[in-house]
Image (cartoon, grey):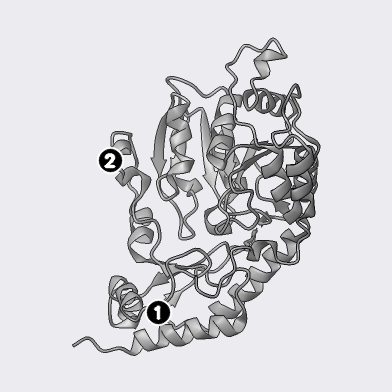
Amino acid sequence: MQNDKVDFMFKDVDLSPVMELLQNHDISGWFKNNEGGKNLRLFQQCFSTYCNVSHALTTSSGTAAIYVALKACGVGRGDSVIVPAFTHVGSVAPIVLAGAKPIFIDVDIHGNLDPKLLANPHAKALIAVHMLGMPCDMDEIKKRFGGFIIEDASHALGAEYKGKRAGTLGDIGCFSIGGGRTKTIACGEGGMITTDDDSLAEKCKNIRNHGDRVTDCDYMCFNFRLSELNALVGLLQMPRLSMLNEWQLNNANYLMKRLPNFLQVPETPLYAKTVRYMVSCLFNEELAGFSRNVFLRRLIDQKWDGGVPRKNIGGAWGKLVSDIRYYRKYSKYPLLMSEKLRDESVWIDYHRFPRTKEEIDKLLDHINIVSSKVEP
């Protein structure tokens, strides 16, 4: 991180509204107010306009967004929810918190839930994770599953499926806008819910903000609010969102054309417009002449300055969620592709803002050096 500025995500952004808020206004925005402050409401409006969806509602995190979405869909004790095991645990923990049981399902070559494997008609809901910015095949999912469909679009802000934004294709979309160096735009901590369903939107609005204080609802509400300060931080980045996605797409294309042949990027489906949250490669051991783990170890041995977001090249999820001790007790179908991707994937996020093509060339040079290294 020697040459990185902590504020790179806010380069050329006027931060004076933040100081004004800190000096003159309620940084929570929720005092005697069930709608949140003006910056939060404007952030929601900008987000819904960007996604072309009727409702956008902030939450305190992406994980909270998924929990609120599950409860709005009526998921509770005794229910089951289909979810891939090849995902972040934040896609799964809300299912258990809601009182339901996760049913782990395998994925396709992109790491997305494989619709052909949907075989549990009794599940109350399904969480479709758009892995690394690649949209799931939503038409096939909807054709084969009749319950509530929740999209985890945490990696996919700006991605499209057949011309529609990810997060607007199922019943409810959920986004993480938290991690400062991992998400395209970030609030420090935060999440967003999107839906075109007025009834679900009203439930999400109540559940995130003790709505039972102001309406006679028959479901439990809680506090998953986003502060006015966090919302303003997100709002200030919205005008740059298209530029940031275009930046990482252009750099990803530049990178992919120059990768060695043993790092193979699966072809993008015709229905999808990915945002390349990460460049995901399958490591071909036969072409390389050595294993993926040897390759990754060599990068570390050669002191590649990675290991942090936007400067990293490494493996995929170290574990499937179903590998984690707490979640092993939940039933699962065979997860052959999930295990293959866990063991053979190489993920690169060095292409994202503020990386330049000159910096990418240095990464490629480094890959070529470790690739030609002969084991003693």
Crowd class of label 1 (few under 14; some 14 to 19; many from 20; radius 10 Å):
some
Calculate the distance from the C-alpha at mark 2 to the C-alpha at mark 1. 33 Å
Which residue is rendered at x = 63% and y = 52% of the image? 186
Q: Quadrant of the C terminus?
A: bottom left
Residue situated in front as seen by the camera: 287 or 86:
86
SS at mark 1? loop
Residue placed under numbered mark 1 in the picture: 262
Counting from the top left corner in percent of width and height, residue 253 is at 61, 76
Q: Can residue 200 be seen in this view?
A: yes
Q: Is residue 257 visible?
A: no
- Residue lying at the far front of the rendered structure: 23
Circle nearer the N terminus (2, 1) = 1
Residue situated in front as seen by the camera: 271 or 256:
256
Residue placed under numbered mark 2 in the picture: 325
Which residue is rendered at x = 64% and y = 70% of the image? 249
Find residue 175 and report its image quarter: top right
Counting from the top left corner in percent of width and height, residue 333 is at 34, 42
Counting from the top left corner in percent of width and height, residue 14 is at 78, 59
- Residue 367 is labelled as none
Above or below: residue 176 compared with residue 181: above
**Left or right of residue 121: residue 357:** right
SS at mark 2? helix
Please tell me whether mark 2 or mark 1 is closer to you in this view.
2
The total of numbered circles placed on residues is 2
Crowd class of label 2 (few under 14; some 14 to 19; many from 20; radius 10 Å):
few
Above or below: residue 147 compared with residue 40: above
Q: What residue type is labelled 1?
A: Phe
Above or below: residue 123 compared with residue 12: above
Which residue is rendered at x = 38% and y = 88% of the image? 369
